[in-house]
Image: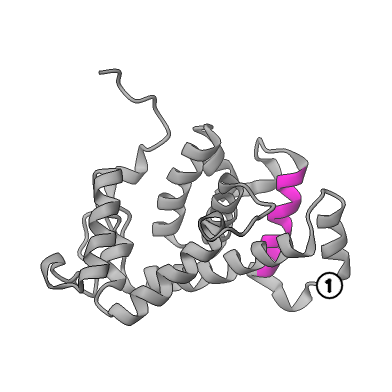
Amino acid sequence: MTTTAAPRYPFPDLATLPDDIRARILAVQDKTGFIPNVFLAFARRPAEWRAFFAYHDALMTPEADGRTSGLTKGEREMIVTATSAANHCLYCVVAHGAILRIYEKKPLVADQVAINHAKADIPPRQKAMLDFAMKVCLRSHEVNDTDFAALHAHGFTDEDAWDIAAITAFFGLSNRMASFSGMQPNPEFYLMGRVPKAKT
């Protein structure tokens, strides 16, 4: 399936959406220059769109609500990229991999993390974080005190562990919705953060 394939569920017309949803989507378009497909895909059901993005924002931008987190923006995207790869979600690996490259300022990191975080060019702290995230993703019923201790050894708190698990779980939902519905990454995502922007 190519990046131009039509999704199984057609995107709604932007003009028909509720004002709050349309305003948020247009703000994203103004910032990025395009509308990420996930914003339109979920907009077909406004109540679900609002719930999805409210939880997304609480997890990925907690500082907007005054909550502190032991995870950087790049680390949050690292979790999404690694676990989305484990869930075989093309959309989320490509889209969040792009954001990860930008936050970390490393053009190779997203590919490395998606394929094998244990061999990625990241510090041991982030490898421990991704070890925990991958266990939550693939074998959450096996998580035990030893896994928390491994995080604590790298300075993560139990609240950080909650963040890692919640991001993993939330994007598990996102991965499955994107995959079943045929949601494709916007072409713009593929090159973001890989090559320097042309000087104007």
Count the marks: how many? 1
Residue 119 in sight: yes
Q: Nearer the viewer, residue 97 or 152?
A: 152
Q: Is residue 40 magenta?
A: no
In this picture, is 166 found above or below 153? Answer: below
Residue at 21% x, 55% y: name it. 4
Q: Is residue 156 left or right of residue 70?
A: right
Q: Which residue is mark 1?
A: 144
Q: Residue most toward the front?
A: 66
Q: Is residue 127 left or right of residue 56?
A: right
Q: Position of residue 137 (x, y in %)?
A: 63, 68
Residue at 33% x, 54% y: name it. 185
Q: Position of residue 10 (x, y in %)?
A: 18, 72
Q: Nearer the viewer, residue 153 or 128?
A: 153
> What amino acid type should be assigned to the residue bearing mark 1?
Asn
Q: Position of residue 100 (x, y in %)?
A: 51, 44
Residue at 18% x, 72% y: name it. 17
Residue 3 in sight: no
Quarter of the image for the N terminus: give it. bottom left
Give neighbour class at mark 1: few <14, some 14-19, many 20+ (Cα, 10 Å).
Answer: few
Q: Is residue 12 left or right of residue 144?
A: left
Magenta range is 125-136
Residue 39 placement: quadrant: bottom left
Q: Element at badge 1?
A: loop
Quarter of the image for the C terminus: give it. top left
Residue 14 placement: quadrant: bottom left
Q: Position of residue 41 (x, y in %)?
A: 28, 69
What is the chief secondary structure element of the magenta stretch? helix
Q: Residue most toward the top?
A: 199
Q: Nearer the viewer, residue 183 or 149?
A: 149
Q: How is the image coloured?
A: one colour
Residue 156 placement: quadrant: bottom right
